[in-house]
Image (tube, rainbow, N blue to C red):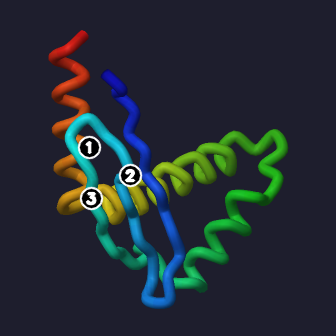
């Protein structure tokens, strides 16, 4: 059995679309908007791309920001039918191991 979870993310005229093209549990489509405003996104990218050098606190802050933004993005995309397919696919793969 193919245990892959093929997720396609697309920018649309109305926002974004997540499509599970293939998974052990089936297929699904979900429209979503980014969980942050353009200004916040731009500021975050600038901060993440800034050279932290030897400043451990700045590296820690960059890491925390990346985790926070990534978590928000994951929670936005993996909701509703996409999350249900992810959980069911994971459950099936786990049981088949």
Q: CA distance from mark 1 to mark 2?
A: 12 Å
Mark 1 and mark 3 lie on one chain; the one further toward the N terminus is 3
Extreme-front residue of the structure: 1
The percent coordinates of residue 6 (x first, y second) are 43, 45
The percent coordinates of residue 69 (x first, y second) are 48, 60
Which quadrant is the N terminus positioned in? top left
Q: Is residue 51 left or right of residue 76?
A: right
The image shows residue 46, relative to residue 88, as above or below, that is below
The percent coordinates of residue 93 (x first, y second) are 25, 23
Mark 3 and mark 2 lie on one chain; the one further toward the N terminus is 2
Extreme-top residue of the structure: 97
Q: Is residue 74 left or right of residue 29?
A: right
Q: Quadrant of residue 28?
A: bottom left
Q: Which residue is mark 1?
A: 86
Determine crowd level at label 1: few under 14, some 14-19, many 20+ residues with C-alpha closer than 10 A.
some
Q: Which residue is mark 3?
A: 28
Q: Which disc is residue 21 wearing?
A: 2
Q: CA distance from mark 1 to mark 3?
A: 10 Å
* Secondary structure under the numbered disc 1 in the rendered image: helix
Task: Give the residue drawn at x 56%, y 79%.
Answer: 40
The image shows residue 46, relative to residue 70, as above or below, that is below
């Amino acid at each position: 059995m193919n245990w892959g979870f093929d997720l396609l993310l697309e920018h649309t005229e109305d926002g974004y679309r997540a499509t599970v093209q293939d998974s052990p549990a089936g297929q699904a489509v979900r429209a979503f908007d980014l969980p942050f405003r353009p200004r916040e996104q731009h500021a975050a990218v600038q901060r993440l791309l800034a050279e932290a050098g030897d400043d451990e606190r700045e590296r820690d802050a960059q890491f925390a920001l990346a985790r926070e933004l990534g978590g928000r993005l994951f929670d936005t995309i993996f909701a509703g039918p996409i999350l249900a397919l992810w959980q069911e696919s994971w459950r099936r793969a786990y049981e088949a191991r």
